[in-house]
Image (spheres, grey):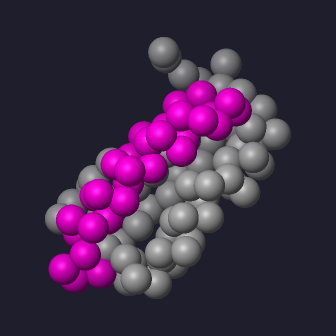
Amino acid sequence: MNKFGILATLQARPGKEAAVEQFLSSATPLVAAEVGTTAWFAFKIGSATFGIFDTFKDDEGRNAHVTGEVAKALFARAEELFVSPPQIQMVDILAEKL
């Protein structure tokens, strides 16, 4: 069972919504290379609000993701793409259905 997760919410700068969508889509191969990341979702909540949700079986997988290529790319482009820094929350998964 996945026991750990990350929930990130992102608010795109005006006019940068398409760039955020493209950035999130382009991150898929980077996440696919992460052995410890069991699931990864990029989603859109509203016209300018986006999110990422990841799951991990252990804290080591989550820590590897936090220091991995996607996180580096996200924070490297944060000022360009987002109104404020990404809001990152570490979560404990209580139940799951796969």
Q: Which residue is painted at 46% across and 84% down in the image?
A: 79
Residue 21 place in picture, x, y as percent: 28, 58
Q: Tell me the magenta residue range.
A: 13-42
Determine the image quadrant of residue 11: bottom left
What residue sits 45% from the left and 50% below the top? Answer: 27
User: Does residue 60 appear to the left or right of 97 in the view shown?
Assistant: right
Q: Quadrant of the N terminus?
A: top right
> In which image quadrant can residue 51 be found?
bottom left
Q: Nearer the viewer, residue 2 or 26?
A: 26
Asked whether, in this view, residue 82 is left or right of residue 57, the answer is left
Residue 20 can be seen in this image:
yes
Q: Which residue is drawn at 77% across and 49% down?
A: 63
Which picture quadrant has residue 14? bottom left
Residue 83 vs 18, above or below: the answer is below
Does residue 17 belong to the magenta stretch?
yes
User: Residue 70 location, x and y as percent?
Assistant: 56, 55
Q: Where is residue 58 in the image (x, y as percent from the top left)?
A: 77, 32
